[in-house]
Image: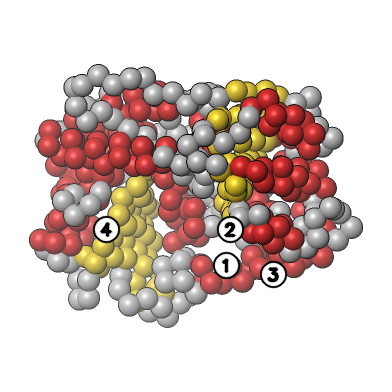
Amino acid sequence: MKRWLSLSALLLLASVSVGAQQRPTLSVPFTQFKLPNGLNVILHRDTSVPVVSVNIWYHVGSGHERPGRTGFAHLFEHVMFEGSMHVPEGSFDTWLEAAGGNNNGSTTNDRTNYYEDLPANALELALFLESDRMGFLLDDKAPDKINGQRDVVKNEKRQSVDNQPYGQAFIELPALLYPPGHPYSWSTIGSMEDLTAASFEDVARFFRTYYVPSNASLVIAGDIDPAATRTLVEKWFSDVPAGKPVPPLTAPTVVLDGVKKKTITDRVQLPRLYMAWHTPALMQPGDAELDIVSNLLAGGKNSRLYKRLVYDLQIAQDVNAAQQSQALGSNYVIIATARPGQALDRIQAVIDEELDRLRTTPPEAREMQRALNQIEANFYRGMERVGGFGGKANQLNAYHKAAGDPDYFQEDLDRYRKVTAADVKAMVEKYLGKDRRVELSIVPGEKK
């Protein structure tokens, strides 16, 4: 759910060079094979510490839903932890914790992922658990599990959207940016009315269509023996039926032909402004440049917008900017919260002044250097560990999906190393125009 405002986290794991010195080519070695049922498997050996991460991506997200039946992808992120045919309810977490492991999952428009990080000697436990919920989630208790998690998801929406300050932005922004029916026009958490109306068979059909080996990729990274690990994967996953081929998600390119403005009231203390644009898709030309723009504008206390709005003028409490990278097309979002007594119009005017500066004058060398150094540091921090959402296991899966090559680390670095100040200026001018964007204001008042 909270992935909406962090869709750019994937691309912040990319970098540029901090100097002219030559560096060795970056490589994360892997072996790859595919089971007869279509499951793609990627193995990476890292013996620095005796841990292993089992990371699986199902290539289905909220964008694969359809109008009137939204919320299924996020629902299954919950249901997957509720036990399967050979794993009693509650045992998934209990068994992992007893082995010293931890786990999590997340849903975006484009994919759903899960991971288990645990001691290397407990690898087979994680493989058993993942294979059982892939092949045997819909057992005879499935209707009760799904109905129970519908209520959990509804409560999550009440907590994180309906009763969360500014939470309505998660619903409003997608609807303003995309036309009805577009795969990205609804929020990841989906519609509670849709979840209520859906029959068990509706929900089960979604699982049988998308949660199949041929629509998944499994990464195992850490202190492993690749040959022995392959044997374990074959043991636990080979009996899962392949499922039917899943067609790729497609949608027409969306273009805003003007400025779309909306103001809503909410039980908040301070006004907040959201400005959003359509930008290039993940890994496409312009995507890396706009990540750098985010750093120049709001990447730390010396960034342009933070310095002007928060430090110098003291008219904003905070400001953030992000390239929200997605497969079918991205969004660029700037968010600023006003200080008490300050108007959003004044904040927007300052934001436009700084965007105008970038449209007309390339950033200075020192700004570029600082931004690129910060991005590079984030990249290497992510490579220091194998597990979690930001570690190598998840990144191998991300590169496999986005670029068709799990070891795309060097190429991703090179995208950022090639960016010049002139490129930054050109992308701001091309994509962040004043005449084609969304302007959403949330102001104090009675919630409607």
Sequence-first tag of 2 and 4:
2
Q: Secondary structure at mark 1?
A: helix
Coordinates of residue 85 in the picture (x, y in percent): 85, 53
Mark 4 or 3 closer to N-term? 3
Nearest the eye: 259 or 412: 412
Report crowding for label 4: few under 14, some 14 to 19, many 20 or more residues within 10 A (C-alpha): many
Mark 4, residue position: 319
Q: Position of residue 432 (x, y in %)?
A: 29, 41
- The amino acid type, in three-letter code, at marker 4 is Val
Tell me the tag on residue 151: 3
Q: Earlier in the sequence, mark 1 or mark 2?
A: 1
Query: Where does label 1 land, which residue?
Result: 157
Please, what is the three-letter code of the amino acid marked with disc 1?
Lys
Instruction: Identify the residue position indicated by label 2 in the image.
Output: 189
Residue 371, compared with residue 67, is above or below; it is above
Question: How far, Cα to Cα, is label 4 from label 3?
Answer: 34 Å
Q: Position of residue 259 (x, y in %)?
A: 34, 50
- Which amino acid lies under the numbered mark 3 shown in the image of this protein? Asp
Q: Judge left or right: residue 303 versus residue 161.
A: left
Q: CA distance from mark 3 to mark 2?
A: 13 Å
Please tell me which residue lies in front, 135 or 358. 135
Single out the residue that lies furthest toward the bottom: 446
